[in-house]
Image: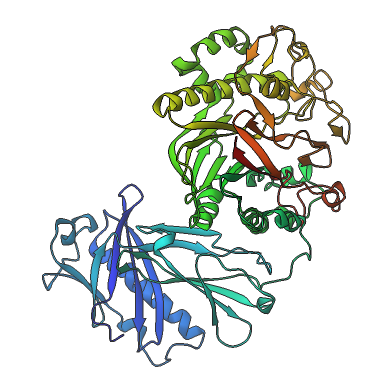
Amino acid sequence: MTDNENPNVFFSRIKEDKYLLVCFQFQSESFKIDDYCSVVAKLTTTADYLLNKIVICITNKVKELKDAGGALGDVDVESISAKFYSNDCPVSADCLCMDLPFWVGDEMHLRIGSVRYNIVLNGPCVDEIILPRVIIVGFPISPFTFKTSYTNVGDCDFLWYRKKQGDFELIGNGYSYTPTTEDVGCILKLICIPGNGDLKGPKVETESKKCVKEGPKRFPFEDRHIFTQTAAAPGSFRIMTYNILADFCAGTPNIRKDRFPYCPLHALNINYRKQLLQKEIIGYNVDIMCLQEVDKSVYQDHLLPLLSTRYNGTFKVKGTKITEGLACFYDKSKFRLKEQHGITLAHELQINPRLRNLWTLMKPEVEKIPRFLKASTSLQIAVLISQEEEDNCVIIANTHLRSWPEPDYFRALQASVALAYLQSVVGDISKKMPEKKIATILCGDFNSTPDSCVYELMVNQSIGENHPCWSEVCRPRWPCGSGAAVRNRGTATVAGSNPASGMEENKDLKGINLSHSFNFGSAYGTPDFTNYTNDFIGCLDYIFHQKDALQILQVVPLPHEEEVKEHEAIPSVVFPSDHLALIADLCWT
């Protein structure tokens, strides 16, 4: 065994306190082994059962090493033994794991062979760590899966290695690593040593399944990075909105075939797209980012740890059955969070007293649309105070309105709920901090083109009860209306033409006067497209800013259509989403 007299073994209750996790670093000079071991047992099993699992785990590790020619061939693995001691007396083999003496504060240790292991409760441990399947030169990678107990990314040490021939060599440290041309053809290995204060847990390592490879030579978003090489000027801030395409919207065979048949399967895989997204997002050097279609796992396991050095983040999942939602990140050196909100629009409309007047107005009509009251469409709000100028406050709202087959008026109703709730937040902040200069932004994927009633509501502050949208009787397949700003590639499916589609005609809905008080303008105006697929091209995404409080300094130019359609449409091998990011620099007026 190792000469270390008192290594640690970590015990943690997991899975609703029904199981016990035991993990430790097993080091043995006799077996020439230094490896991570972990076992899980029910708290209702005996100490003898747990010890047997520990011995089996160690034995398997040693046998694997012997089979690979690494361990000494004349060492008898059957001699491995493990025993619990309390106050230097053996613990009864029949003692249940839930009754082990250390739970009540008694001194207890584990002996494996002749080595004593101190038992540490709830120490830092890595539960799971996996590298991406696809690793491309020039694109930062981080663990595709990273789950821990009693630690976080900031308290862990990370070491990166590569192996082409011979032994692994150290090439970097930190949570992420950007492969170089020297790594092409190499297997990468990542070692993580979890920490919690001065306490270090057992190290865990993982290797890439495939070698590092070259990717496409040119990515159009790198041209956009030219405009964001430096940070936003003092007194201003840079904001981005981006629908990053949820994995469940791209990851199933049927969806791939129906929505994105032109995109290679490997380019739709979240392993691939995540690396492109990370490099693209970081390169925009923004102060505030509003993201839509963010998978919960992507937020928790990738974006949050990757961005945590510079940004703080908030997340609002869409309903209870959908695992994607809205994410907002802000530069913590530039802003501090005063408060945050996350609501489901339909639910909030019915229960919030501040929205009672709107609910009274809408109720007779929306009750004719059961889907409206069941929709999981959400709104996320972050109230941010400028760290540079304490008198400045920006209220950021992020949303993703319902897509087809719903008609324009469906989204107009949703937008009105979002605007009403946002107005209530602005009113509260104005009362709490009357000295602040407040500016408001509502951005996201509105699934509405510039000719829609949603856009009209946003920029003209109202749509009347006689607006044509209320008499819409056919629901197009496309995410919005069919005006000049929309170029449909194919034949639309309309209500009545396909009874199985479930899109009924609207004959009973009465018009409603909808209005708001925000003086909003679209930072990008009305570009030809922000969404580009093989059956729809149009502008669906917006940064609506308060024109009487904010001034536009620059917007980052969108890619040319030739670039977007180079691979027919997006997503593609060089575009990670079917939407384009919008980035604008704004300052207080």
x%, y% of residue 398? 58, 35
x%, y% of residue 293? 62, 41
Residue at 58% in and 78% down:
162
Describe the colour scheme in one phrase. Answer: rainbow
Residue at 65% in and 71% down:
210
Question: Is 409 in front, or is 3?
Answer: 409
Q: Quadrant of residue 522?
A: top right
Q: Is residue 234 above or below residue 212?
A: above
**Res 324 visible:** no
- Give the left or right position of residue 403, taking residue 166 as reference: right
Q: Is residue 41 above or below residue 85?
A: above
Residue at 45% in and 57% down:
147
Residue at 50% in and 84% down:
67
x%, y% of residue 541? 70, 36
**Res 21 visible:** yes
Which quadrant is the N terminus positioned in? bottom left
- Give the left or right position of residue 564, taking residue 336 as reference: right
- Give the left or right position of residue 284, taking residue 145 as reference: right
